[in-house]
Image (tube, coloured by chain):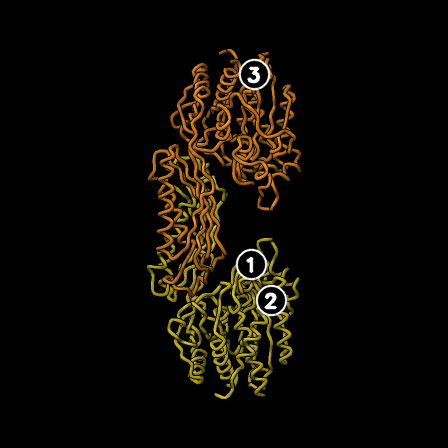
Chain colours: A yellow, B orange
Amino acid sequence: MKNIQVKGDRLWDSLMEMAKIGATEKGGNCRLAASDLDKEGRDLFVRWCREAGCTVTVDKIGNIFARRPGKDNSLPPVMTGSHLDTQPTGGRFDGVYGVLAGLEVVRTLNDAGIETVAPVEVAVWTNEEGSRFSPAMMGSGVFADVFALEDIQAKQDVDGKTLGAELRRIGYEGAEPVGKPVKAYFEAHIEQGPILEAEEKTIGVVTGAQGQRWYEVTVVGQEAHAGPTPMARRRDALVGAARMVQAVNRIGLENQPNACATVGFLQVSPNSRNVIPGRVFFTIDFRHPQDEVLTKMDRELRDACSLIAVESGLEVEVEEFWYFPPTPFDEKCVAAVREGTKLYGYEHMNIVSGAGHDAVYMAKVAPTGMIFVPCEDGISHNEVENADPKDLEAGCNVLLHAMLERAQG
Amino acid sequence: MKNIQVKGDRLWDSLMEMAKIGATEKGGNCRLAASDLDKEGRDLFVRWCREAGCTVTVDKIGNIFARRPGKDNSLPPVMTGSHLDTQPTGGRFDGVYGVLAGLEVVRTLNDAGIETVAPVEVAVWTNEEGSRFSPAMMGSGVFADVFALEDIQAKQDVDGKTLGAELRRIGYEGAEPVGKPVKAYFEAHIEQGPILEAEEKTIGVVTGAQGQRWYEVTVVGQEAHAGPTPMARRRDALVGAARMVQAVNRIGLENQPNACATVGFLQVSPNSRNVIPGRVFFTIDFRHPQDEVLTKMDRELRDACSLIAVESGLEVEVEEFWYFPPTPFDEKCVAAVREGTKLYGYEHMNIVSGAGHDAVYMAKVAPTGMIFVPCEDGISHNEVENADPKDLEAGCNVLLHAMLERAQG
């Protein structure tokens, strides 16, 4: 098996070709889910897959499956994939790498004339990022029965357009029902963190995913004129929210190692220079690999927000918006990834995924594994996101091995 | 003189009639400067003034002057006025009271058949609030030569529309040059603060206005994925900005009595739930009656922001955007207001204006005084803003006296 290798140059060229669609001035990508640019990216992928001999189907939530037949097409497929949508100021590799690494595996199998026992499929999951339509990971979430199809189709962007209508508009509301048996699922992804680079490892063997708790917090005070309202009489919602942002950060720092705590979105009302803010809305993203620590962080958050509200004469509402328990991956899939790294001689380490990935939902309905490769300075969700072509090639070789291993048995 | 009294009911009815234009669901008003609703409010005022026998002129920046002739019309007018534009979620009295109190003075003079020596004018100043077009107090600012006419005409709202074009569109770009001699200027206004109510006084004799320093602050960190980026490696612009919001509040608290410090506007970028904020922009509004304290607050602000930026690995830019020194009012005008309160037997106290008012710019070019009346709970720039009809009547009687006193000499 050692002789079979993907073509790193071909993979890189495909990545750079895809990156032209929705390219931003600072070298990143903006392909929001179900936008015209998302359609362009999907069209390019579909064309490439058909050129590689795959049959392409699309399900009702817009997930695309490019299938390379096996010897026994009654078997469920060994699947890989990720997403083509990006953050508003996203990078060229987040998601796209996993999709095009899957395509490169298919191309490599074609070049080598290998017929697998089980069929092989490359999936593109709809709206992984959750930027235009919230929450994130919608396509894989419906596939894994985490979300109801109708609920997700009805989700609206800020302009009130629904995901369902937008998928129809761009021609990616398919006819297939959502969900089917999958023999094994693998996903290759940039790490989106700095650990592999710091440890000088080429491959992260992902053993599972962190748990996540997402919150929406509303702080209500009293809007009033900024000039004549004495400091002592104010009920300034932003001053209270600023303390809560500090508290979130402190909770993250106090639950090391591995805790992450972020306020990513914050909105002030009425947001006028000379008006004391009467209302602030913000979101919180907590992550940790152990559920009991997440529970502790939840308690610390609620205590801190209540205390700050009482001390500041404010009202606060902390609503848990999304909860995702820590997810261990399938032992055999993880082993197949680890074997691949050894076969090709790559430096590797075990790692826990801090980000949500489609693989985390897929783990609910199929044996699942993930492969991480380093990204420059650990930076992702940013236009400067970058990765080394050699590392991307290495991750793709490991993916090739793992898929072959699971598709032959 | 004691026998001449304004009609409180007529004043109240006019206020409530005007409040129907741009009425909000929560009982407030939204008449943004140079909007269709602003035009409606202006049209109503102009109609009422003509019905009261005034001649109406409009200058090139949209300031309206309703003139009641005197015996000697070669004399500069004794003027009163304020503004009809409101905050996006503003109240029914802020500004409007000063304009309609002026109209009520004219109506009362008509009823009593009094001919003043100097003419009397009621002014409506364009865009006092500064909500749609920034900065605030544009009409009186151009009148007082603080701003150049062309600069202010070219100011844009968020949609890129200029104030000049919008005034033309609503029919309030007048033919008159901006600025003319004024014998004395008075402005009646709700206090927009809680002091009169707390001290149980009907009238605030305003001796001058606080100085103001307005800033724009930009904090730059590093945007990155909220999941896999360890806490210790983050450069979170919002966590830094939250500390700066706290510092602004602390500076306000530590410079009592009389200091005010507010962050009213804050914008996070990219503002996405699962992205560490890379950039935060916010505004600061500092006020104090003594210039040396404002200078001290400026120094404390710059020190605090620099320190926080260094400690957090962030970049910060603190730009002073507007500076207005403390403004004492004219001794004779202040005395005329005080005499009026004594004549009618109202409980009164000296007070310093915390808010910017058109009177503060007018003080640069004319002897100026102001009259404050209480507002409920000291709340303004809010839809629940409220005032007692009896207090509004009292303030209008004091205005009548002060204007008569200055218009007869």
Q: Which residue is mark 2?
A: A21
Q: Which chain's residue wears label 2?
A: A
Q: Amino acid at mark 3?
A: Ala
**Helix, strand or loop under label 2:** loop
**Helix, strand or loop under label 1:** loop
Q: Nearer the viewer, mark 3 or mark 2?
A: 3
Q: Which chain's residue wears label 3?
A: B
Q: Which residue is mark 3?
A: B118
Question: Can you tell which quarter of the image residue B162 is in?
Answer: top right
**Answer yes or no: do the residues labelled 3 and 1 have beta carbons within 8 Å?**
no
| A360 up-or-down from B188: above or below | below
- Left or right of A334: which side holds B8? right
Q: Nearer the viewer, mark 2 or mark 1?
A: 2
Q: CA distance from mark 3 to mark 1?
A: 64 Å
Q: Callout 2 environment at 10 Å: few (<14), some (14 to 19), or many (20+)?
A: some
**Answer yes or no: do the residues labelled 2 and 1 have beta carbons within 8 Å?**
no
Q: Amino acid at mark 1?
A: Arg
Question: Can you tell which quarter of the image residue A40 is in?
Answer: bottom right
Q: Amino acid at mark 2?
A: Ile
Visible residue check, residue A364: no
- Left or right of B53: which side holds A330? left
Image coordinates of residue B334 in percent, x first then y, are: 44, 21
Q: Which residue is mark 1?
A: A132
Residues at marks 3 and 1 on the same chain:
no
